Every structure is written in structure tokens, then in C-alpha cells.
Image (tube, rainbow, N blue to C red):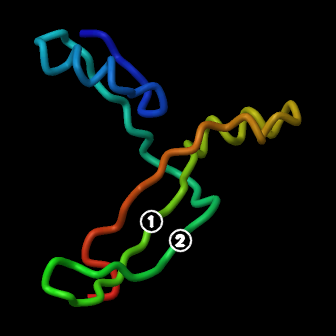
Amino acid sequence: MKNIAMNKVNKDVLLEMLQGENLQVVIPSVVKVVDYQTGYFTNKDGEEIPYASLKVVDLEELEKLQSVGLEENANEVKVKLKGYGG
């Protein structure tokens, strides 16, 4: 089975997975939050619903990049939070 990092998942990779290619998405066990966003959106019933999302990086990758002064090259992944503010 072929492994692929979460930050490398794109439309083509997802299509390959759906077509039966054996890919495994690797999700890091520890991440660091580098940014966040909150707000509200209006649903189809006119209700204002709170939302939040996080930008995270693989902590191990970040630490390795920091050791050589390249932390700005860490790959960020956006995570949407379900049930935020409920």
C-alpha cells in the first residue's frame, strides 16, 4: 500500500483513491496550531451558525525545519471544526 502525506492530497490523489488505487493518507499524531479563524454563516433556514477552522502543521516536520531555519516551509493543513460554539 502506498502512503501519502496529508499535505499532498489533492484532486488527482482523491480520484486515484476512488478508482481503487491503494493509497493511505498519513495524518500526523501531533500537530501545532499556527492560525485559526472563527465566524458565522447563515444556513438555509436563516439561522446564524458559528464556525471555526484551524491551520495546523505536523509538529515533527516543523521541528525539523526549525532546526535548519526553514520553518516557513512547513506544510499547513486546514481543519474545520464541527459543532464549534454549539
Q: Mark 2 points at which residue?
A: 37
Q: Is residue 32 left or right of residue 64?
A: left
Secondary element at tag 2: strand
Residue 34 % position (x, y): 64, 59
Residue sitting nearer the eye, 49 or 23: 49
Residue sitting nearer the eye, 72 or 3: 72
Q: How crowded is mark 2: few (under 14 residues within 10 Å), some or many (20 or more)?
A: few
Q: In this view, does 86 lie to the left or right of 8?
A: left
Residue 69 % position (x, y): 88, 36
Q: Name the residue under label 1.
A: 53
Residue 55 % position (x, y): 54, 56
Quarter placement of the N terminus:
top left
Residue type highlighted by circle 2:
Gln
Q: Examine the rendered structure and indicate whether residue 75 appears above or below residue 16.
A: below
Residue type highlighted by circle 1:
Ser
Q: Determine the residue positioned at 21% across, 78% down.
A: 43
Q: Determine the residue positioned at 20% across, 88% down.
A: 46
Q: How crowded is mark 1: few (under 14 residues within 10 Å), some or many (20 or more)?
A: some
Labels 2 and 1 touching (C-beta < 8 A): yes
Residue 84 % position (x, y): 33, 79
Q: Examine the rendered structure and indicate whether residue 55 appears above or below residue 36.
A: above
